[in-house]
Image: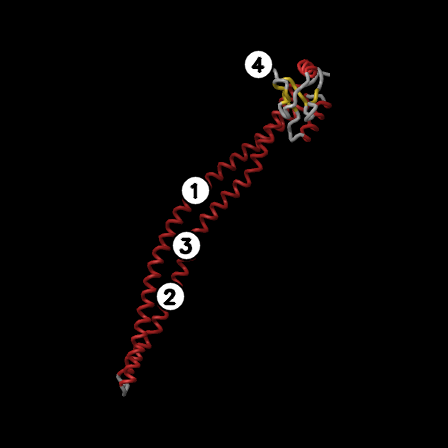
Amino acid sequence: MDIEFENLINLQKLDKEIRHVSALLENIPLRIKEIDKKIETSSQIISEAKEKLALNQKNRRGLEAQIKDLKPKISRYKIQLNEVKTNREYSSLLKEIEEIDQKTDSLEEEIISEMLSADDFEKEIKEATQKHSQEEAKFLEEKKTINQNNKDLETRIKKLIQEKEKLLRQIPSPQSKLYLDISKEKNGIALSPVKDEFCSMCHMRIRPQVLNELIGEKKLIFCENCGRILYWLKKPA
C-alpha cells in the first residue's frame, strides 16, 4: 500500500490551522467581556461623580436648615434684650447672640466650601460623561469588529473542517486512523519532518538505514523516541 505522505502532511497543516482558528474563537468571548467591563468602568466613574454631587447637595441642605433654625433664636434674643432688667442678663443674651452669629458664620463658610466642591463635581461629571461617550463609541466599534471577526472565523473553521473531512476520505483508513490516534496523543502533531538526519520534534538522530527507508517513502516509519510518523523533508530544487 502506498503511503499518502503528501495528504497526511496536508492533513496536519489543516489541523494546525483548525487549532489556531479554534483558539481565536475561544478567546473572543473573553475579549468581548473585557470590552463590556471597560464600558461599565467608564460609566461607573460618572455614577460615582453624581453620587458625590448628590451627597454635596444633601450636606448643603443640612447646613442651610441649621442656619434657618438659628435665625428665630437671634430674633428672640434681640427682643429679650429690650426686656431684661439686669446687666448680667443683658450680657448673657449678648453672649448667646454672639455665639449664634459665630455658628452662623461657620455654617455659611461650610456652605461656600460645599458650593465650590459642587462646581468641581459638576465639572468632573461633565468631563467623565464626555470621556465615556468617546470611549463607549470606540469600545462599541471594537466590539463590532470582534463580532465580525467571529463570523469570519466561524466561516473559516467550517471550511477547514470540510476540507479535512474531504482529505480524510482520500487517505486509506488504516493510515488516517493511525494519524488521528497519534495526533490525539501528541497534542495535534502526528508527523515530524526529518531535517539534517534529526527528528524535528524531539531532535532524536535518525539511523542511516532508517533515513534510506524514509527517502524511499515505501512504509510508515516512527520516531524511536517520540513515536511520531517521520517523513523526509525534500529540499527544494
Q: Position of residue 117 (x, y in %)?
A: 35, 58
Residue 22 placement: quadrant = top right
- Left or right: 141 with respect to 199? left
Residue 229 placement: quadrant = top right
* Distance between the alpha carbons at the discs numbered 3 and 4: 67 Å
SS type, badge 3: helix
For the residue marked with disc 3, what is the amino acid? Ala
SS type, badge 4: loop
Q: Residues within 10 Å of mark 3 (few under 14, many from 20)?
A: many
Q: Position of residue 205 (x, y in %)?
A: 65, 20
Q: Position of residue 171 (x, y in %)?
A: 69, 21
Per the image, the residue denoted by label 1 is 137
Task: Say whether marks 1 and 3 touch (CB < 8 Å).
Answer: no
Q: Residues within 10 Å of mark 1 (few under 14, many from 20)?
A: few
Which disc is residue 82 wearing?
Answer: none
Residue located at (49% from left, 38% from top): 144
Per the image, the residue denoted by label 2 is 61
Q: Position of residue 71 (x, y in %)?
A: 32, 74
Task: Point out the frontmost of discs 3 and 4.
Answer: 4
Per the image, the residue denoted by label 4 is 236
Residue 217 appears in the figure = no
Task: Say whether marks 3 and 4 touch (CB < 8 Å).
Answer: no
For the residue marked with disc 1, what is the amino acid? Ala
Per the image, the residue denoted by label 3 is 49
* Distance between the alpha carbons at the discs numbered 2 and 4: 86 Å
For the residue marked with disc 4, what is the amino acid? Pro
Task: Point out the frontmost of discs 4 and 1.
Answer: 4
Query: Which quadrant of the figure contains the N terminus?
Result: top right
> Which of marks 2 and 1 precedes in the sequence?
2
* Distance between the alpha carbons at the discs numbered 4 and 1: 51 Å
